[in-house]
């Protein structure tokens, strides 16, 4: 008789399952449900998965859902991009609720600062993913 624990019986800690990993963040974004992190100490909200608060360094961060529409905080037009990523498209920093997220503006759309945009998909760059936003 053996007391060897069976594989796969290791309980995942709550901490680990609640953590906003890059993979979980990516899956949520692909599902059209952007997620961010809210700091329990300073209240700062970020739109990307981090191990700690980017403002104060606290590890007391919890996962929050972000809205799918927001406003353009700043934008830039990419005239020449590496690889086959198209040209003449815009990238923008978008205020999504309390968070700010980098996104790509849908091909053919053009946005200005303070324009309202909506998350409509995702775009993959070399294994990294960004949200695609359309002007509203
Ligand atoms: Zn903080």
Image: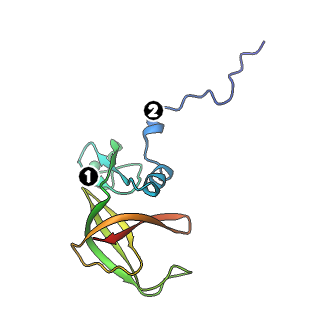
Front residue of 13/108: it is 108
Verify CB contact (< 8 Å) between mark 2 and mark 1: no
> In the picture shown, does residue 48 fall above or below 113?
above
Looking at the image, residue 72 sits to the left or right of residue 83; the answer is left
Q: What's the residue at 31%, 53% (across, down)?
A: 66
Which residue, as the protein is rendered here, is positioned at the far front? 136
Please, what secondary structure does the residue beneath circle 2 have? Answer: helix
Q: Which residue is mark 2?
A: 14
Label 1: state its secondary structure: loop
Give the distance between the C-alpha atoms of the residues marked 2 and 1, in whole angstroms.
Answer: 23 Å
- Respond yes or no on whether mark 2 lies under 8 Å from ligand 1: no
The extreme right residue here reads 1
Quadrant of the frame with the N terminus? top right
Name which residue lies at 21% across and 72% down: 114
- Residue located 45% across and 32% down the image: 14
Q: Is residue 54 above or below residue 86?
A: above
Q: Position of residue 23 (x, y in %)?
A: 51, 52
The image quarter containing residue 90 is bottom left
Q: Residues within 10 Å of mark 2 (few under 14, many from 20)?
A: few
Q: Please state which of residues 19 and 107 is positioned toward the viewer in this rendering.
A: 107
Q: What residue did someone put label 1 on?
A: 44
> Farthest residue toward the left?
114
**Quarter in which the C terminus is drawn:** bottom left
Q: Position of residue 36 (x, y in %)?
A: 35, 52
Q: Is mark 1 within 8 Å of ligand 1?
A: yes
Q: Is residue 86 above or below residue 11?
A: below
- Picture coordinates of residue 85 (x, y %)? 51, 79
Query: Dot 1: within a 10 Å radius of its alpha carbon, few (fewer than 14), some, or many (20 or more) residues?
Result: some
Q: Write the residue at 29% across / 61% down.
A: 69
Mark 1 or mark 2, which is nearer the start of the sequence? Answer: 2
In the rendering, which numbered label is found on residue 7? none
Q: Position of residue 54 (x, y in %)?
A: 33, 55
């Amino acid at each position: 008789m053996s007391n060897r624990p069976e594989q796969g019986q290791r309980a995942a800690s709550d901490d680990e399952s609640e953590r906003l990993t890059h993979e979980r963040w990516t899956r949520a974004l692909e599902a059209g449900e952007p997620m961010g992190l809210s700091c329990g100490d300073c209240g700062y909200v970020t739109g990307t998965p981090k191990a700690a608060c980017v403002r104060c360094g606290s590890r007391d961060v919890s996962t929050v859902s972000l809205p799918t529409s927001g406003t353009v905080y700043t934008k830039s037009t990419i005239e020449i991009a590496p690889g086959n990523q198209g040209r003449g498209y815009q990238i923008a920093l978008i205020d999504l609720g309390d968070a700010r997220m980098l996104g790509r503006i849908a091909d053919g759309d053009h946005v200005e600062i303070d324009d309202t945009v909506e998350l409509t998909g995702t775009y993959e760059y070399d294994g990294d993913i960004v949200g695609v936003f359309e002007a509203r």
